[in-house]
Amino acid sequence: MKLTGEERARIADSKHKIQSAANSLTHVDPRKVPHFDEIEECLENADESLKGALRTESEPEKPNAIPTENRCKERASLSRDLAVAIKNVYLSKKAYYDARFKKQDTSDLWAALQTARVAELTVERAFNDHVNRHGCKI
């Protein structure tokens, strides 16, 4: 069944979030996380599954199937901004929980986490608004 434009955009956004989560794990000591290898494999499999869902029979399997001049630069920029925002939420959340675990004062870290979450939602909304308004695919 063919995906609608909105479904394709949502899958692409989810794919970016999974890639961001996978990139964030590169800064984590695998010995400290139970089943770390399985988590990485799960993220990799999810990324591949979503990539497959975005392909249609008429599209080649090349990563750069759309010529560079036809790619939307604003969407690419917003996508990168969204990945950074997701990473910032992750890092803020990690700092907060690390401090909480050590029974340290977390008030500043909590405020930073809330700020990071608001920033993520703002960028995500801008990204979705752009895709809906502009109708760009990549």
Image (tube, rainbow, N blue to C red):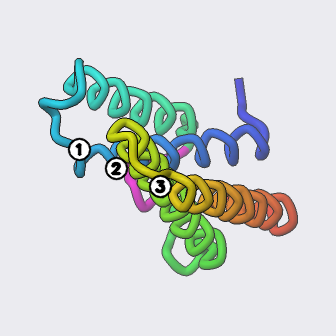
> From what the image shows, is residue 99 above or below residue 51?
below
Mark 2–mark 1 contact, CB under 8 Å?
yes
Name the residue at 65% across, 63% down: 115
Quadrant the N terminus occupies: top right
Closest to the camera, between mark 2 and mark 1, is 1
Secondary structure beneath dot 2 equals helix
Inspect the image, locate mark 3, and give the three-letter code of the amino acid beneath it: Ser
Closest to the camera, between mark 2 and mark 3, is 3
Secondary structure beneath dot 3 equals helix
Instruction: First in sequence, mark 3 or 1: give its number.
Output: 1
Dominant SS in magenta: loop
Mark 2–mark 3 contact, CB under 8 Å?
no
Residue that label 2 marks: 24
Real-space Cα separation, disc 2 to disc 1, in angstroms: 8 Å
- Tally the marks: 3
Real-space Cα separation, disc 3 to disc 1, in angstroms: 14 Å
Residue that label 3 marks: 92
Decide if residue 30 is on the left or right side of residue 110.
left
Sort mark 2 into few (<14), some (14-19) or many (20+) by Cα contacts within 10 Å: some
Residue 129 occupies quadrant: bottom right
Q: Which residues are magenta?
A: 59-64
Residue 70 colored in magenta in the image: no
x, y percentage for residue 137?
67, 58
Q: Which mark is residue 28?
A: 1
Name the residue at 80% across, 62% down: 135
Sort mark 1 into few (<14), some (14-19) or many (20+) by Cα contacts within 10 Å: few
Real-space Cα separation, disc 2 to disc 3, in angstroms: 12 Å
Q: Is residue 19 visible?
A: no
Name the residue at 78% across, 44% down: 6
Secondary structure beneath dot 1 equals loop
